[in-house]
Image (tube, rainbow, N blue to C red):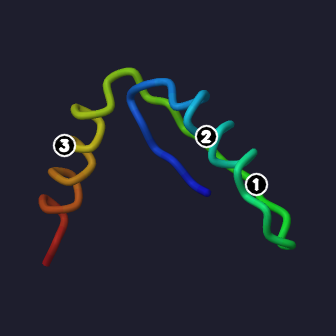
Amino acid sequence: MFLFTGSDPSAHVSADLAAYSGSIPQRTVTLRVSAHQAFIRDAYEAVISIAP
């Protein structure tokens, strides 16, 4: 599971991983950015500005 979020999803992620009963090992990577919306906006604007 890969999460990119502005909030703390720890409780939800822990519950989801604990509820999994399959045979494939599960992992999570969570990147928390306090200014999440601004980061996403800036990233999109940067890509658009260099697009051909």
Q: Residue at x 46, y 44 (%)?
A: 4
Check residue 51 in the rendering and tell me which mark sits there, or answer none.
none
Q: What distance separates the C-alpha of mark 1 from that of mark 2?
A: 10 Å
Q: Residue at x 86, y 72 (%)?
A: 23
Quarter of the image holding residue 11? top right
- Tell me where residue 14 sits by quadrant: top right
| Residue at the spot of label 2 | 13
Q: CA separation, marks 3 and 1?
A: 28 Å
Q: Residue furthest bottom?
A: 52
Q: Nearer the viewer, residue 49 or 36?
A: 36
State which mark lies toward you, 3 or 2. 2
Image mark for residue 27? 1
- Percent from the top left, x then y, of residue 36? 32, 32
Per the image, label 3 sits on a secondary structure element best described as helix
Read off the residue under disc 3. 41
Check disc 1 and give the amino acid type. Answer: Arg
The amino acid sitting under disc 2 is Val
Residue 13 percent location from the top left of the image: 61, 40
On screen, 35 above or below 27? above
Could you say which is closer to the camera, residue 11 or residue 28? 11
Give the amino acid type for the residue marked by disc 3 in the picture.
Arg
Whole-percent x and y of residue 45? Answer: 15, 51
